[in-house]
Amino acid sequence: MAYFVALIFGFAFGAADQYLGSRLVLGAWAPTVSMISAPWLLLSFAAGMTQERRRRAMVLGLMVVAPALAGYFAMTCSPIESVALGRFATCFTTIARVPYNPLWILGGIVFGPMYALLGQRWRVDRSRISATIVVCTLCFEPLARLLLVPWMLPPQPIVWWSEVAIGVVLIVPFGLAIARRRPVQSGVPLRGDEL
């Protein structure tokens, strides 16, 4: 059942992200929000938090990101975005190949399972590493984009500062949870012996 929910939720997430990005009537912030990578990674992290076993969490992370990408591309090629239904297949395969989309697909395949594993480690062990990586993902994405791909950082500072602020705010609940340190006690092996 978890896999089915991941497929449906992932597809809906990707479609909604693309739809938001195409709503220019909302203002320039909408496409900028759609371009942020952190929510995609946090989607996998959240999926991993639902699992006690590492392998299952990683599979679930992939199973939520792959349909999210498919949902994004499907919405791009849908009649909602003024693409004729007869052109859907051609549009879908073309958009999945150009311009940077193969890189995003590869990133989803690699980082989806990794962030799901971080979510699972947070669930079972209140991993400081997991918390740190999530906070850093939010706080440093704008800087990383500015340094690595400056042409892909739209001039919407309110969006980027909001992302950083969310990362900073998350320090508090992560810190409190680590201080209380109540990992799940279910008899499930927590070390590498389950891989």
Image (cartoon, helix red, strand yellow):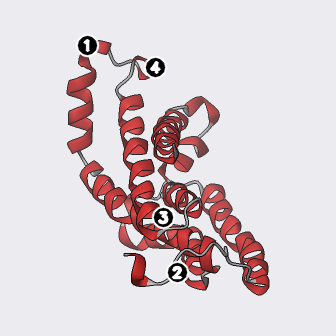
* Residue located 55% across and 62% down the image: 51
Q: Residues within 10 Å of mark 2 (few under 14, many from 20)?
A: some
- Identify the element where label 4 is drawn: helix
Q: What's the amino acid at mark 2?
A: Leu
Contact (Cβ within 8 Å) of mark 3 with mark 1: no
Who is closer to the viewer here, 32 or 129?
129
Could you tell which of marks 3 and 4 lies nearer the N-terminus?
4
Q: Is residue 36 left or right of residue 126?
A: left
Q: Residues within 10 Å of mark 4 (few under 14, many from 20)?
A: few
Q: Is residue 29 left or right of residue 15?
A: right
Q: Where is residue 129? Give x, y as percent.
A: 55, 83
State which quadrant residue 128 falls in. bottom right
Could you tell which of marks 4 and 1 lies nearer the N-terminus?
4
Relative to residue 119, is residue 190 depicted above or below?
below
> What is the C-alpha distance between the residues marked 2 and 3?
15 Å
Could you tell which of marks 4 and 2 lies nearer the N-terminus?
4
Could you tell which of marks 2 and 1 lies nearer the N-terminus?
1
According to the image, label 1 marks what residue? Answer: 86
Q: What's the amino acid at mark 3?
A: Ala
Could you tell which of marks 3 and 1 lies nearer the N-terminus?
1
- Identify the element where label 2 is drawn: loop
Residue 190's disc is 2
